[in-house]
């Protein structure tokens, strides 16, 4: 069961990790193009002071992406990115004596640190970076005596004001984002509980109805028992859908392969004669609007095959095929019996229910009778999802 109201639960970590993965990819791409453009510009203006360092940092970007990011080592990739940006920023500021636009690189560095980590670690990285910068300024103060920026009190005051604003914004954004994640996850958890309870109760109610029919059948004659059993099987097929939804991670979709196999084997278990069922089913997740009609269709076809098709067949075989192509779902049901030779079968309630459920799917039904009976059903998923 999912955790609830934890300070930083697993679901929040998963959500933030996915967001962080996208940010790391984006930062690699941005850093690569910016460094490449700067190298080309420096070559064009014949400013060779920082080119060797920028080329080295560009190489480290490649290393970080292919050695860490591609292998899922996002912490290492984040550390390398921050180290690259820190070295490049400090080098640019000292080479150009803190003039021009170079001090402004501190702001995106801080935002990057907060984006890659929690606000606490972002604050730690940012303060560490500023302390290193302050120490370097203290030791190399004489070398920067010609800097216009460092001797402009108004410029420094404005810079520090913006720095404080960036810090406050980054901390506020990160804490509120985590809180929003937690609220959303808790809301989804409550919704999942509600869906679970609904499917559980529907399944139980259908099972009660099925049991009542089974009890009633014991008091009736053979013909009536057969009629009741068919109705019971139809109810059981719907109950199976809700049973699978109850235990599924997805409250709105069912694994069609597992459902059809379980449904067919459940029905097969009620007959005495061994009949081979071959499944050729793709792993498809189908919605409630799709799986219930399909379940009823397969239930009817299997029941009719078991009852009518294999009286004089030595090796009875049933084949069920399910596959999807783009937005189209195709279901093929085949048995090698002689059910198509019975007129009463053609007019039976089961065949009518099959046609009715195909209509509910807004699909098409094709029936062929070459060497057995084949049903081919095709419908568009876009009409139901």
Image: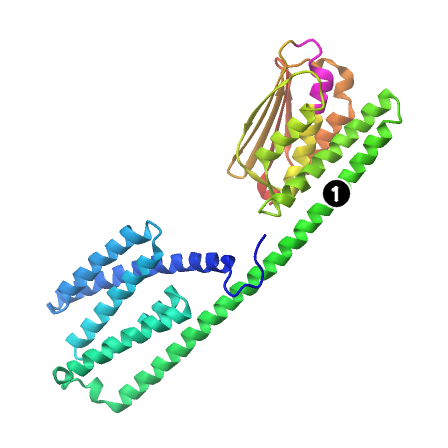
Q: Nearer the viewer, residue 23 or 350?
A: 23
- Image side of residue 142 versus residue 258, left or right: left
Q: Position of residue 191 (x, y in %)?
A: 64, 56
Q: Position of residue 242 (x, y in %)?
A: 68, 42
Please say if 361 is above or below 342. below
User: How many C-alpha atoms fall within 10 Å of the one at disc 1: few (<14), some, or many (≥20)?
Assistant: some
Is residue 157 at least partly visible in the picture? yes
- Image side of residue 247 versus residue 226, left or right: left
Residue 64 is drawn in which quadrant?
A: bottom left
Which residue sits at x=30%, y=83%?
A: 159
Q: Which residues are magenta?
A: 303-313
Q: Is residue 337 magenta?
A: no
Q: Position of residue 272 (x, y in %)?
A: 71, 17
- Image side of residue 288 versus residue 344, left or right: left
Q: Is residue 312 magenta?
A: yes
Which residue sits at x=21%, y=73%?
A: 90
- Image side of residue 274 versus residue 179, left or right: right
Q: Nearer the viewer, residue 269 or 363?
A: 269
Q: Main secondary structure of the magenta part?
A: helix
Please say if 315 is above or below 236. above
Residue at image mark 1 = 204
Is residue 358 at least partly visible in the picture? no
């Amino acid at each position: 069961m999912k955790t609830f109201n934890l300070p930083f639960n697993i679901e929040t970590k998963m959500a933030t990790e996915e967001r962080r993965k996208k940010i790391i990819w984006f930062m690699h791409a941005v850093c690569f193009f910016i460094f490449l453009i700067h190298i080309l510009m420096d070559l064009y203006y014949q400013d060779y002071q920082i080119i060797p360092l920028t080329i080295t940092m560009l190489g480290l970007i490649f290393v970080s992406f292919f050695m860490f990011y591609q292998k899922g080592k996002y912490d290492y990739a984040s550390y390398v990115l921050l180290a690259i940006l820190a070295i490049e920023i400090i080098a640019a500021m000292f080479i150009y004596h803190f003039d021009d636009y170079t001090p402004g690189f501190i702001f995106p560095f801080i935002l990057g640190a907060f984006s890659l980590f929690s606000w606490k670690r972002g604050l730690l990285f940012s303060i560490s970076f500023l302390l290193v910068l302050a120490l370097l300024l203290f030791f190399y103060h004489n070398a920067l005596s010609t800097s216009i920026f460092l001797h402009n009190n108004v410029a420094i005051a404005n810079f520090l004001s913006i720095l404080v604003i960036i810090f406050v914004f980054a901390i506020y954004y990160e804490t509120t984002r985590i809180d929003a994640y937690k609220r959303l996850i808790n809301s989804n958890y409550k919704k999942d509980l509600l869906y679970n309870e609904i499917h559980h109760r529907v399944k139980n109610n259908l099972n009660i109805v099925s049991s009542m029919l089974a009890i009633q059948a014991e008091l009736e004659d053979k013909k009536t028992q057969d009629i009741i059993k068919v109705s019971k099987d139809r109810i059981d097929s719907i109950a199976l859908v809700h049973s699978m939804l109850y235990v599924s991670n997805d409250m709105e979709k069912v694994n069609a392969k597992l459902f059809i196999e379980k449904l067919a084997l459940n029905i097969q278990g009620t007959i005495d004669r061994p009949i081979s069922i071959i499944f050729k089913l793709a792993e498809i997740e189908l919605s409630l609007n799709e799986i219930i009609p399909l379940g009823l269709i397969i239930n009817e076809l299997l029941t009719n095959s078991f009852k009518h098709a294999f009286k004089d067949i030595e090796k009875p075989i049933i084949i069920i095929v399910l596959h999807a192509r783009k937005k189209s779902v195709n279901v093929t049901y085949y048995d090698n019996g002689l059910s198509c030779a019975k007129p009463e079968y053609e007019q039976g309630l089961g065949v009518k229910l099959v046609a009715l459920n195909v209509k509910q799917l807004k699909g098409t039904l094709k029936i062929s009778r070459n060497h057995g009976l084949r049903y081919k059903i095709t419908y568009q998923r876009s009409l139901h999802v």
